Image (cartoon, coloured by chain):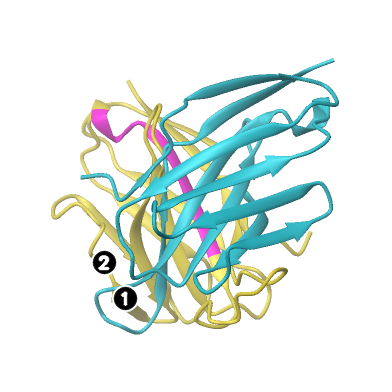
Amino acid sequence: NAGVMQNPRHLVRRRGQEARLRCSPMKGHSHVYWYRQLPEEGLKFMVYLQKENIIDESGMPKERFSAEFPKEGPSILRIQQVVRGDSAAYFCASSLTLGDRIDGTNHGYTFGSGTRLTVV
Amino acid sequence: DQQVKQNSPSLSVQEGRISILNCDYTNSMFDYFLWYKKYPAEGPTFLISISSIKDKNEDGRFTVFLNKSAKHLSLHIVPSQPGDSAVYFCAEIVLLSSGSARQLTFGSGTQLTVLP
């Protein structure tokens, strides 16, 4: 499967614990985007990373959330001291370019299947 | 303030009829609008896009119409099939604040149910 791989698919954490969500982009893709979908809402942009760099984190909550995309290995979205309001589906997308080759067939983004985080 | 709005959370249509999904936006400075389809427990998959310089794009059973004066776009599916039952999101492509890449701004989605 050459798609965007996210794991785990489901993650249950107690309040106050840490959650780590992993995203392996498509082969050859060097741009990773994280989105969060709260219940009954659309997907909201969180952060955009390239290898070893955070390009834009304007959608990230100011506290407890961090993201990285190391030179080797998957991108990690880390949530410290989780609270019930963090329960959501977290989606990762990757792209080869900056998404600028957008036409009728190539929109530049491929999404993973998501990680559903439940905080109890 | 929502930049992209999908005011109908759900829509039911009979198989073979036309499905029309609507989306309104506030930001005129977009480059493209994209429609995504999402099944439960899966990520969104790209369906069709439209450039800001066009007013229509067609791909098989799917056609997207853009009305810039009304800041409105719609996705038409004809004929509708039961396999089309999914949540449909419209998404706007905008530049990120860094100016170096693009994020997607999604609407809240419309659940389409096609009845056999």
- Pointer 1 chain: A
The label on residue B24 is none
**Percent x, y for residue B5?**
38, 41
Please state, as top left, top right, bottom left or bottom right, where the N terminus of chain B lies in the image.
Answer: top left
B67 with respect to A29 (left or right): left
Task: Tell me which segment is drawn in magenta.
Answer: A85-93
Three-letter amino acid code of the residue under disc 2 = Glu
The label on residue A54 is 1
Is residue B3 placed above or below A53 in the rendered structure?
above
Image quadrant in which you'd find residue A9: top right
Image quadrant in which you'd find residue A104: bottom right
Looking at the image, the residue that sits furthest to the front is: B69
- Pointer 2 chain: A
Q: Are marks 1 and 2 in contact (CB under 8 Å)?
A: yes
Chain that is coloured yellow in the picture:
A
Is residue B102 placed above or below A47 in the rendered structure?
below
